[in-house]
Image: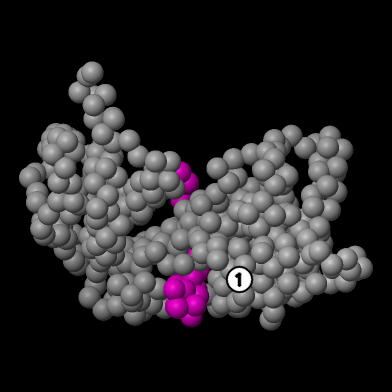
Amino acid sequence: MSKKKKSADLLKISENEKSELSFFIDRLRMQDPQGPSLENCLRSLKQSLVHREALAAALLEALSHEGGPVCFRAFCALQGIVQDKRLTRIVRQAAYRFRQKGFGVCDETSAPMKDSSPVVLVKAQEVKNEAYLAGSVKDHMFQYGAYVFSKDDDSAYALYLAVSPGFSCEHVGIYPMSRKEFKERLRKVAEFLQSPMREVSLGHMARVLESLVSLKRIPAEDRANVPRVRRLLEPYALQDPRPYFLQVWDQKGLAPLREVDLPDLVDFITLNLEFVPYRELFSDKSALERCVTALKTIQDGVITVPEHLTQERLDKGLREATREIFPLEVCRGLAKDWEELALWTLLDGEDLYLVEKIFALSLHAQALEDSGSSPVMRRIVEVAMAVFFNFLTPDLEADLRRLEALEEDSEDSDEELDRTPSGLYVPRGVLE
């Protein structure tokens, strides 16, 4: 047996662990080597990998192939986890790859890298104050980067804001750097998200930050950066109180937005699962599971009751579950997620049909006073029950049959659908 095959056998990990490994790498790709959140990220990874040496070794090997300062920092911090003599050879090989890439020797206590970008005094007229946005529709991730002149110390700063699915803040950062360094970092962000960079208003970035603050979604390690970032963005506050999406819509000279009826929104959200961050919204499935159990009890009751009473009980149970799963603060976050998704889709030149529907979802979620009364939020819960627990409510089943018939009759439809074990048709690849 070859050495390569022996290494592969030692690194056998389960499918769940492969998903974890991919998540760990993606999380590290989001980090800035000088960012204050990196240390917390590494501590969290360490806690997750303790007593899981095979997975730790697999991550170290993947990091060595990936390369880069963040991966090297992670390698230095995590290599001590692997103590199994059969796995240490893999760690040594990973260290060798890093040395080939120009990184030196490290140990578990390696100190963080020093910031190589000191404050540089510049003239205000030499700085182009600008902001950019990169987005991933599939992952519901948005990254904002701005380059701004500060009158306080006659210096230029790069501001970064990373928003994760469901409109949570991954990172707020401020760094002194040259415009060339800023552009290079933007290029890497765009490469990571497989997204172009689109220019946006500095005032919009300021609004996104304020929304994250008001929703209490700034990570503890980054809260100290918020006042400085706010102060630098303050001169560029938008005077138009409308959402920035509407301002861009007008700037493009488009016809007025069409009003979208609630039944159309429900159909849209039923067939377009990629526009809901299901994994993040239902990372804790306990409430959803209780809902499935309660509705199954009503639906499969041994005592015969009139059909309309059964339907009333199902509706009541679904409304109560929706209120529990989607308190209003979650609805507000989802509204902002959809607003940014609509903006990105508009900036990226996608079909205006999609843009109007996504923005209508945002307006609907923003205006809610009771999530249980919303057919859109209830439908999200129904689809989640079908996807995660193979349970179909009568309403969802009826709508799927109706929409399936429409899909078959549509000559323009060329989208391939997959059928889940529960009988739900979803666009191919959405929940892979």
Decide if residue 3 is on the left or right side of residue 23. Answer: left
Q: Is residue 375 within the magenta segment?
A: no
How packed is label 1: few (under 14 Cα within 10 Å), some, or many (20 or more)? many
Colour convention: one colour
Q: Residue at x 22, y 19 (%)?
A: 2
Q: Can residue 340 be seen in this view?
A: no
Name the spot of residue 340 as percent of width and height, x first.
56, 62
Name the spot of residue 65 as percent of width and height, x first.
26, 36
Name the spot of residue 313 as percent of width and height, x first.
80, 72
The one of 153 and 165 positioned closer to us in this rendering? 165
The one of 309 and 139 positioned closer to us in this rendering? 309
Q: In which quarter of the image is residue 298?
A: bottom right
Decide if residue 291 is on the left or right side of residue 158. Answer: right
Instruction: In the displayed orientation, state which residue is furthest to the top.
Output: 1
Name the spot of residue 239 as percent of width and height, x first.
55, 78
Decide if residue 147 is on the left or right side of residue 266. Answer: left
Q: Residue at x 46, y 67 (%)?
A: 168
Q: Give the range drawn in magenta.
A: 194-217
The amino acid type, in three-letter code, at marker 1 is Ile
Q: How many marks?
A: 1
Q: In which quarter of the image is residue 3?
A: top left
Q: Is residue 215 within the magenta segment?
A: yes
Q: Residue at x 79, y 64 (%)?
A: 301
The residue labelled by disc 1 is: 325
Q: What element carries label 1?
A: helix
Q: In which quarter of the image is the C terminus?
A: top right
Q: Is residue 362 above or below residue 412?
A: below
Q: Residue at x 42, y 67 (%)?
A: 169
